[in-house]
Image: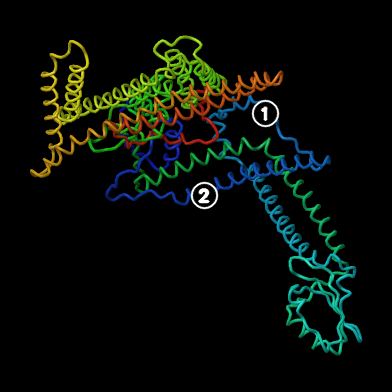
Amino acid sequence: MALLPFKKLTLIAHSRDEEAILTLLSRSGSAEIVRTSEIEHLTRGDASSRVESVTSELAEISFCLDFWRAEKVKLEKVLKRQAKEQTTLTTYSPEKVSLLDKIRAAKPEVAFDDFDKLGADHEELDRVEARLREISAKETELKGEASRLTSLAEQLSYYKNCDLPFDAFKAGRHLETAIGLVPADQLAAADFAGLTLYMEEIDNRQRVATLFVAYPVVEREAVLDRLSAIGFSRCAFDFPMTAAEKIAEIAARKEEIAREEITLAEEAVSFEKEYAEKFRILYDYYRVEKEKAAAVSSTFRTSTSFVLTAWVPAHLADATEQALVDSGVTYYSLYEDPAEDEKYPTLARNNAVVTPYEGITNMYSAPSPREIDPNPFVAFFYFLFFGMMVSDAAYGILLALAGFGLYALKKPKKGEGHLLLIIGMGGISTLIWGVMFGGYFGEELIAPVLFSPMNEPLKMLILSVALGFFQILFGMGISFVAKCKKGEPLSAVFGEGSWFILFIGLGLFVASGMVEGFGVLKIPSLVVLGLGLAGVLVGGAMGKKGVKGKVLGAFGNVYNVTGFMSDILSYCRLFGLGLATGVVGMVVNLIAGILRDLIPIVGYLLYVVILVVGHIFNIAINTLGAYVHDSRLQYVEFFSRFYTGGGHIFKPMGSDLKYIHLTSKGGKDL
């Protein structure tokens, strides 16, 4: 259980073999390409045009996948409307997937040969993509037309009460008629004295009046001037039909557009079943191609050769070299240990119990490759605290069954499904603590092995603080060992060592006053306490410049005891969450029991429903709380004592796949 060592591979080869070498390394899953240091008289590789081309291909494929999702959502809405209106709008029938199949759903395995074949020849997919683009363009056109028609219908609605067609409003030989809109308040205050004018208000809505006017042609100018003064806007429509007829025509056209959109969506979705998986494979093919292009940009080269640099895990160096030999390319390779100041990737190797907890550590920060692997310690304490925060044996059984059961059903590939394993192991921890505390669905069905937190909360608080103090001291111990390994024994002794001595002295002093027969330890405990305090002062002064700096550093280090107290008090969350689980469970049982006793017959049904829903809620909310707060205890209180972090996880070229798993012909997983 450790962070694995790496070798730096420097490889020189002929440019004609570059593609073959990059493909080989991307298939091996053993090399993370890094930027080659500048070499005099050589030029930096430039694959920007290839990156741009591949990025464009990825965008096209993403469009197809996203378009299918959007079209299916559209058709599902049509199905809901179809069911509501009891009509037939579409023949689309979504594929039904059982819950078990959804759980088992995993990335498909694709052999290298099939992967390369699809990447080399995908003309058929290009034709499908082109047709989907045409469908999308046509839908956009139809949406634009529908939007314009909606706007037109809204404008026409003001004239819906008019029985005359729009082209009837025109100037005759002696009389002219017009129709238009005018602000209602302006119309009410208007004065048309002295004019020969007939007016009729056809409609009035939203403070706008629809006005019909008729006037002699000879008074046209005077009438229009007076109407313009009150904001009259003459209708510009000249349709040979009434507004109601035009609105009906628009509604019919919008229905036609809706049917066209459904037909287009059905055609688009019809391609998905046959081609979606191929598009996903092709997407990952171009992701690998993009990585290879980026690798070219990381090299230095002459007109005929190139120099490539990569990090290779030490245990995979021989296999990588053998793969290069077997490929038949001409090359020169050099495997070197990292320089003292050189930062290389982090790759942890742990057993099946610890590995799932690597994700917890990495969420904070990947370990620095040269520090002690924190994952075994995180696994132990995370397991320990998780169960204490949920602390109900029955809940633990359910969590273990859910976590391990779903993992067994899903059968995830290597490196996946870690959260399910964490929940499953958290269930085991919860079962153990539940037995210790006597909690079973919020009730004390069996006498606790230790004590009942509900009846003896002070003991729960003391236990929480004690476990927190132990974890903090454990973290300091890791730091002590790490400093010694780095050749800094004085820093370890006057740093963590002094605090250990101080705490030992403090513990003995407290025991001498509280435990019968320990009184003789009072003087020795004060001596130990003094030695620890002196060490803390010296540790704080070490490395500081000047007398003032040393004094401030020394007493500032002593002041850190407040930080210890604050960190230790943070572990009270173990106490709080542990009690919360039992209290909520007890309240659920109490409410269910009251309803059962108050309401005849139906009360028993409510009793079962409340118990099931209430306890499921309690499990869910407290599991989430345990997951979050347990992580916080590791990140803030534990890691602050020893953890450096700042590393980056080993990411070999060809491993950044979104939709598939690449396998060799024999099916060996990368």
Task: Single out the residue that lies furthest toward the left.
Answer: 547
Q: Nearer the viewer, mark 2 or mark 1?
A: 1
Residue 642's tag is: none
The crowd level at tag 2 (other Cα within 10 Å; few <14, some 14-19, many 20+) is: some
The quadrant of the picture occupied by the N terminus is: top left
Residue plotted at (17% across, 28% down): 492
Position of residue 373 relative to residue 177, above or below, is above
The crowd level at tag 1 (other Cα within 10 Å; few <14, some 14-19, many 20+) is: few
Three-letter amino acid code of the residue under disc 2: Ser
Q: Is the residue under label 1 in contact with that under label 2 (CB below 8 Å)?
A: no
Secondary structure under tag 1 reads loop
- Find residue 80 and report its horizontal and vertical position in percent: 75, 40
Task: Locate residue 606 relative to residue 223 in the image: left or right.
Answer: left
In which image quadrant can residue 33 be found? top left
- Find residue 85 and report its horizontal and vertical position in percent: 82, 42
- Find residue 277 and report its horizontal and vertical position in percent: 62, 35
In which image quadrant can residue 274 be found? top right
Reading the image, the residue beneath label 2 is 53
In which image quadrant can residue 217 be found? bottom right
Q: Nearer the viewer, residue 472 or 248?
A: 472
Q: CA distance from mark 2 to mark 1?
A: 37 Å
Task: Locate residue 223 relative to residue 550 in the image: left or right.
Answer: right
Task: Locate residue 257 relative to residue 400 in the image: left or right.
Answer: right
- Taking the image as drawn, is residue 149 in sight? yes
Three-letter amino acid code of the residue under disc 1: Val
Q: Earlier in the sequence, mark 2 or mark 1?
A: 2
Reading the image, the residue beneath label 1 is 97
